[in-house]
Image (tube, coloured by chain):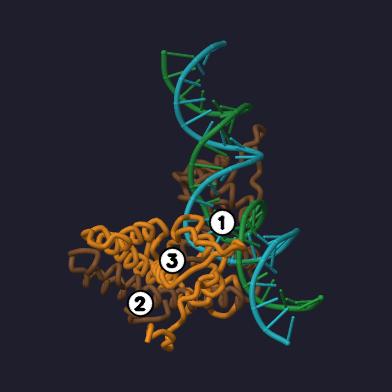
Chain colours: A orange, B brown, C cyan, D green
Amino acid sequence: MPTMSSLPATPPSPLTIGALAKQTGVKIPTIRYYESIGLLPEAPRTDSNRRTYDGGSVRRLRFIRHARELGFEVEAIRQLLAMADDPGQPCRDADLLARTHLAEIESRIARLEALRDEVRRMVEGCAQDQVRSCHVIEVLADHTHCLHDRH
Amino acid sequence: MPTMSSLPATPPSPLTIGALAKQTGVKIPTIRYYESIGLLPEAPRTDSNRRTYDGGSVRRLRFIRHARELGFEVEAIRQLLAMADDPGQPCRDADLLARTHLAEIESRIARLEALRDEVRRMVEGCAQDQVRSCHVIEVLADHTHCLHDRH
DNA sequence: TCTTGATCCTCCAGTCACTGGAGGATCTAG
DNA sequence: CTAGATCCTCCAGTGACTGGAGGATCAAGA
């Protein structure tokens, strides 16, 4: 028997950009955009100039999408991808990148929590009456109402 | 005695755009931008075409800045300003706006916390060794490592 | 009075990370 | 064979600013 092909796995036929979009949840123009800024390599084309992708593309695009969802900026992703493309390197850089990012996330959470408390106080103070006595307007008009000064 | 002027209060001389910027912490181009999109009214000009402002401008710009810092979008601020300009109206709208915004903030916090946990796990799992065994890269490459699926 | 430097003006282009439309070519199914 | 789906490129728009070019005007000191 030649090969044990045609197991229930997906056949390795090249993917269209639409199929890649479906598999990754990334919109087609966004995929083209990622190629244009060099996050994705230039996709090989068919005779009729259509981009083709494979499993590697799916993985790479998922990597990108996932990093974006985690809030990494494109430049950071570019660095992470370069590192991922070059295993065997010490990963101190990736680690530092992630740590920096973690600190950034924690600070964002803190600021959002302060903000939430403030808006909550605003909403709870509203007498549902008239703008004249509305805390929402008042608090926004006068920063001194705030509990925090560092948002 | 004519008037009890020159108390230690600020004199009501018109402000330049630079002074307004200093008093509010909003950059000069941003002030002009707010005017251009109609958040601030067109400022009266001097003979030599320079914008002039007064205490009302300071209050209005502080309102805008504060609302922006709280995460309100310009369109929401436009509505809030319209309400603030028209006291005596029922404030249900402002209240609804703020409540909607509060829900939005809470959801952002939740997503950021999930994200933080994930990045934290990434960082803590890093063996400081090589990319080959680096959790940062691994987690980013494969979404199934995540505790959460809704970030 | 002159001059220097600060401040102001308008207009336009760039930022980031996409998103969408126009206009046209090509593929696929019935 | 045809209709509709999908693809291509190019370009412009989003939101909320930010910054620079090139030029006018102001305030203060020598």
- The image quadrant of residue A129 is bottom right
Say above or below: B61 vs A137.
above
Q: Measuring from the top left, give residue B150's x and y in whole percent.
A: 42, 80
User: Separation of disc 2 and disc 3 at Cα?
Assistant: 31 Å
What amino acid type should be assigned to the residue bearing mark 3?
A: His
Q: For the residue labelled by badge 1, is the local secondary structure a helix, a strand or a loop? A: helix
Q: For the residue labelled by badge 2, is the local secondary structure a helix, a strand or a loop? A: helix
Q: Which chain does the residue under circle 3 lie in?
A: A
Which residue position holds label 1? B60
The residue at the point 43 percent across, 77 percent down is B106
User: Separation of disc 3 and disc 1 at Cα?
Assistant: 16 Å
Nearest to the eye among marks 2 and 1: give it: 2
Judged left or right of residue A53, residue B112 is left
Which residue position holds label 3? A145
Q: Measuring from the top left, give residue A150's x and y in whole percent.
A: 37, 60
Q: Measuring from the top left, give residue B119's x and y in whole percent.
A: 30, 71
Q: Is residue A135 visible?
A: no
Judged left or right of residue B88, residue B100 is left
Judged left or right of residue A80, residue A88 is left
Label 3: few (<14), some or many (≥20) within 10 Å?
some
Q: Which chain does the residue under circle 2 lie in?
A: B
User: Separation of disc 2 and disc 1 at Cα?
Assistant: 37 Å
Q: Residue B2 shows which numbered tag?
A: none
Q: Which chain does the residue under circle 1 lie in?
A: B
What amino acid type should be assigned to the residue bearing mark 1?
A: Arg
Label 2: few (<14), some or many (≥20) within 10 Å?
some
The quadrant of the rendering that contains the N terminus of chain A is bottom left
Q: Residue B114 shows which numbered tag?
A: 2
- The image quadrant of residue B115 is bottom left
